[in-house]
Amino acid sequence: MGYHVISFAYDDVEQRPELCIALLRMVPSRYQTQQTPVSRALLAEKEVIRLAVQLAHPVRPKDIADHFQIDQKTAVHMLKKLCSKGWLSPARSGKGKRVVRYELGHGMLNYLD
């Protein structure tokens, strides 16, 4: 019938309600027209954040490369740019020398509005 169902885990609603609210705000924004032109880079950044939220675990450069069908260096560049804005934070592995994953930052909720 064309209905879209949006479901949330009870734990997310209870422990991270601001994330659930941000995700709900994203749904109608996909169907609204924009008055101001939006750059492709901004759209790509928002899509990276959406993917990170969807995966529900720290995002890897490989996840981004596969999703956008780009090379891994470009994916790393996109992730580093979002880290500099504060929307992602690097998660180091082993002895803390290599960054292998990126976690959602607190500022990403303001970014999605």
Image (spheres, rainbow, N blue to C red):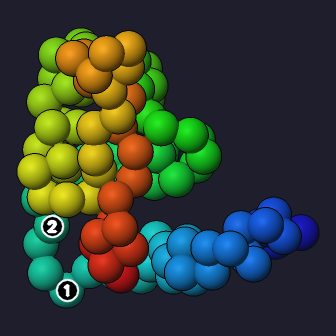
Q: Position of residue 36 (x, y in %)?
A: 13, 81
Q: Which residue is mark 1?
A: 35
Q: Quick check: 81 above or below 11?
A: above
Res. 2 image quadrant: bottom right
| Quadrant including the C terminus | bottom left
Judge by depth and name the residue closer to the eye, 112 or 68. 112
Residue 97 spot, x, y in % from top left: 21, 17
- Label 1, label 2: how far apart the Cα atoms are: 9 Å
Badge 2 marks a residue whose secondary structure is loop
Residue bearing mark 2:
38
Residue most toward the right? 1
What x and y, as percent, mark residue 49?
38, 53
User: Is the N terminus in the top left, top right, bottom left or bottom right quadrant?
Assistant: bottom right
Decide: marks 1, 2 in contact (CB < 8 A)? no
Give the class, few, some or many, for how many residues have Cα within 10 Å of label 1's Cα (few <14, many ≥20): few
Amino acid type at image mark 2: Val
| Residue depicted at 63% across the width and 80% down the height | 17
Type of amino acid under label 1: Gln
Q: With 45 as the anchor, is 77 left or right in this view? A: left
